[in-house]
Amino acid sequence: SQTIHQWPATLVQPVGSPLSLECTVEGTSNPNLYWYRQAAGRGLQLLFYSVGIGQISSEVPQNLSASRPQDRQFILSSKKLLLSDSGFYLCAWTGNNSPLHFGNGTRLTVT
Amino acid sequence: DAKTTQPTSMDCAEGRAANLPCNHSTISGNEYVYWYRQIHSQGPQYIIHGLKNNETNEMASLIITEDRKSSTLILPHATLRDTAVYYCIVRLPTDTGRRALTFGSGTRLQVQP
């Protein structure tokens, strides 16, 4: 069966520091991969999605970037974090005709 | 995307069935109905989906009306751990990108002991 791993679960970083969140999927090939952000009490905001290795679509201009170095690996990065980058970051995957499945999320606090 | 409307909140007694309605009157012929839930501080969890026939799995049942303009998610024996926000969405199975998932405000289900 397919599983999605996302880490770390929580992260506290100072303003101006770099960020790297990693997400991997097991049990499937060529998944569509997604990064979402959820602010406290708010809905999900799509940040990036990828339909294949090296293919990244950005939904909103921001301080973040994404990369897909391998088929089942999706990385969310920032060179310099801002206070406004705090939030709950979720990785998700979907395959052909399959529902979207989410990881457990990373709660990022920028101080 | 077809829009969905759900009640803002519902209560249910522990052990009883929880019936969560969703209206999707503008759903197109090929769009499926999906249900997710989000327990506090966790990622959204997929529950069930269907096109026009009723569906059942180990978590819930999905009843879709014949005209497909509304559906009901049924949790047959609600427990305290079912307290969450439940989201109904409609989409094509092949949708990607922004169209893959658009949550509305959902229904906050509170299971009472």
Image (cartoon, coloured by chain):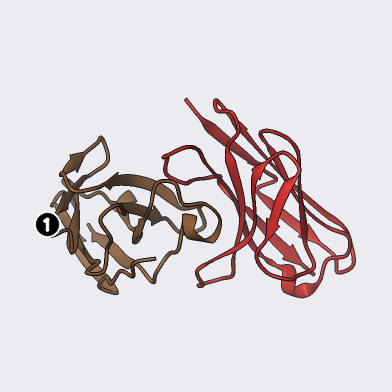
Chain colours: A red, B brown
A62 or B110: nearer the viewer: A62
Q: Is residue A97 above or below residue A79?
A: above
Name which residue type carries label 1.
Thr
Side of A29 relative to B49 (left or right): right
Identify the residue at image location x=39%, y=46%.
B93
User: Which chain does the numbered disc 1 sit on?
Assistant: B
Side of A98 relative to A29 (left or right): left
A59 or A91: nearer the viewer: A59
**Location of residue B12 in the rendering, given as x and y in whole percent from the top left corner:** 19, 61
Number of marks in the rendered image: 1
Q: Is residue A108 above or below residue A69?
A: below
B82 or A68: nearer the viewer: A68
Identify the residue at image location x=87%, y=57%.
A18
Looking at the rendered structure, the secondary structure element under dot 1 is: loop
Side of A20 relative to A74 (left or right): right
Side of A77 relative to A3 (left or right): right
Q: In what quadrant of the picture does the C terminus of chain A appear? A: bottom right
**Location of residue B41 in the rendering, given as x and y in whole percent from the top left corner:** 52, 57
Q: Is residue A24 above or below residue B88?
A: above
Q: Are there few (<14), some (14-19), or many (20+) residues within 10 Å of tag 1? A: few
Identify the residue at image location x=38%, y=52%.
B92
**Location of residue A97 in the rendering, given as x and y in whole percent from the top left corner:** 41, 40
Q: Residue furthest left?
A: B66
A76 or B17: nearer the viewer: A76
**Location of residue B20 in the rendering, given as x and y in whole percent from the top left corner:** 21, 61
Residue tagged by mark 1?
Answer: B65
